Amino acid sequence: MALEKWLVNGPKIIDLELVRSVKISLIAGKIDIIGHDEPGARVEVHGVSGKDLKVSITGDQLEIDHPQLRWDNFIDVFASFRGSAQADISLLVPRDVAVKMGVVSASALVSGLTTDARISTVSGDVVVDSMTGSLELNSVNGELSVSGHRGSVAARTVTGDITVSGTVPTFSADGVSAAVFLDLDGEVDVLTNNTVSGDFTVRLDPGFGARFNVNTVSGVLNLDGSTFRSTRGRGNNFTTGSLDGRFVEVRANSVSGDITTIRRADAQADSGGAAASDVPAENAAPAESTAPAESEASA
């Protein structure tokens, strides 16, 4: 395969004819990846400091990193590197390009892609906007924000909060003290969340049932308008609406975090025609409720 490469220590623009995959590894700075309708890519380096930046393309595979650093283990780079390596980059790529990206403290924006992507960060915030495809996110304490997404999302974090909106049929997250908020529309299949102390909050469309398998030791469960004070670690199986045809499965575990699901108001039921507000799904009466004896149902 043909190989082209550039060692960059300042502002530079590189145009590439054909790119099908992108791999990016950065310590600090900023990286924006924007999808467009052309087969080629444009790399705009706005600034570099600390270590030179290497841009290389082998065939149709684009790679951007600091060649002076070993990227065999992403976390090891963060633990061992004591210097400064910073770059500010904008990248225009085909919408269907495969993306794999790792940053330490750099902030990252990914927008307008129709592909699967894997993004990892230590402390840098990550924003993913208007993307279609399966998304895998990893963070230590960087905030993860996903908006207008279409596709599945899987996230792992320690303390970085997670916010996701869009049409997401499946979602899974594992964290320690991270708060997770989902604002989902359309059909949802399975939502899974496991944390120690982080709250888990979900807003869904009305009109379909839900099956809950949830557990919190000292937190509060508020499931489609029904509240339980604690499951004392023994779990709670709860159903709302009909499980015939279309329904969502919610599986969540926490030690002290609250678990909440609410339904978006049906705009057609709003006689005034105003924007619908968020309300609990009072019309989705529990079809089956198996709550622990110690739980208190609130009015």
Image (cartoon, rainbow, N blue to C red):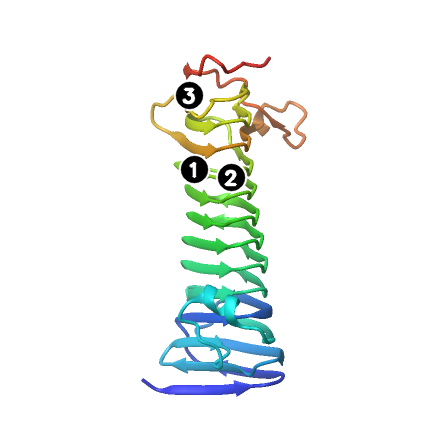
| Residue that carries the numbered disc 3 in the rendered image | 239
Under mark 3, the amino acid is Thr
Q: Where the N terminus falls, by quadrant?
A: bottom left
Cβ atoms under marks 2 and 3 closer than 8 Å = no
User: Is residue 94 visible to the viewer in this orientation of the structure?
Assistant: no
Q: Quadrant of residue 174?
A: top left
Residue at image coords 54%, 32%: 256
Q: Earlier in the sequence, mark 2 or mark 3?
A: 2
Mark 3 lies on a secondary structure that is strand
In this picture, residue 6 sits left or right of residue 84? left
Label 3, label 1: how far apart the Cα atoms are: 15 Å
The disc at residue 191 is: 1
On screen, residue 129 above or below 166: below
Q: Quadrant of residue 270?
A: top right
| Residue that carries the numbered disc 2 in the rendered image | 184
Q: Quadrant of residue 22?
A: bottom left
Cβ atoms under marks 1 and 2 closer than 8 Å = no
On screen, residue 94 above or below 200: below
Percent position of residue 58, x then y: 37, 81
Residue at image coords 43%, 59%: 118
Under mark 1, the amino acid is Leu
Percent position of residue 36, x then y: 51, 67
Residue at image coords 59%, 85%: 9
On screen, residue 50 above or below 113: below
Q: Earlier in the sequence, mark 1 or mark 2?
A: 2
The disc at residue 143 is: none
Percent position of residue 19, x then y: 41, 74
Mark 3 crowdedness (10 Å alpha carbons): few <14, some 14-19, many ≥20: many
